[in-house]
Image: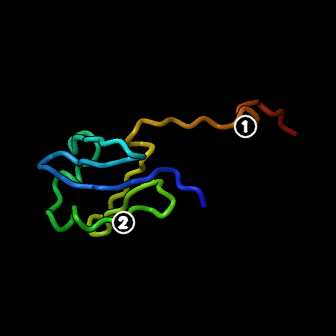
Amino acid sequence: MDRAHDVKKLSFEKDRMRLKIDGKEHVFDLREISQRLLEASTEERSTYEISPSGYGIHWPLIDEDLSIDGLLGVKHTPPESQLSIRPEA
């Protein structure tokens, strides 16, 4: 199975999350991405699972999920065939 992203080195520094995605370091302000993570304890923040496909991160103790594409601002558009209007039968 192809991985969407290679996600490594997740850490927190006060109100910021530091994450290595596809070999590049990114820092995210928790106030902008997740109120749950912002208010979470150290234990809650450190208990996470990176999806095997590389699509997202899950924090089970606070039931929070973040998509990697969402963090990076990647926008997906449907294939052109789905954009055309089909007449009703």
Seen at 25% across and 41% down, the residue is: 27
- Examine the rendered structure and indicate whether residue 72 appears above or below residue 68: above
Q: Amino acid at mark 2?
A: Glu
State the CA–CA distance, disc 1 to disc 2: 33 Å
Q: Residue furthest left?
A: 14
Seen at 47% across and 54% down, the residue is: 55
- Examine the rendered structure and indicate whether residue 61 appears above or below residue 32: below
Of the numbered discs in the image, which one, if any, rests on residue 44?
none
Looking at the rendered structure, the number of numbered marks drawn on it comes to 2
Looking at the rendered structure, the secondary structure element under dot 2 is strand
Which is more foreground, mark 1 or mark 2?
2
Residue 88: x, y in percent?
A: 83, 37
- Location of the C terminus by quadrant is top right
Seen at 36% across and 65% down, the residue is: 49
Q: Residue furthest right?
A: 89
Q: Residues within 10 Å of mark 1 (few under 14, many from 20)?
A: few
Looking at the rendered structure, the secondary structure element under dot 1 is helix
Residue 6: x, y in percent?
A: 44, 53
Residue 40: x, y in percent?
A: 17, 59
Of the numbered discs in the image, which one, if any, rests on residue 49?
2
Residue 70: x, y in percent?
A: 42, 42
Seen at 60% across and 35% down, the residue is: 77
In-image side of 85 versus 74 (left or right) = right
Q: Quadrant of residue 60?
A: bottom left
Q: Quadrant of residue 10?
A: bottom left
- Location of the N terminus by quadrant is bottom right
Q: Residues within 10 Å of mark 2 (few under 14, many from 20)?
A: few
Q: Verify CB contact (< 8 Å) between mark 1 and mark 2.
A: no
Q: Amino acid at mark 1?
A: Gln
Of callouts 1 and 2, the N-terminal one: 2
Of the numbered discs in the image, which one, if any, rests on residue 82?
1
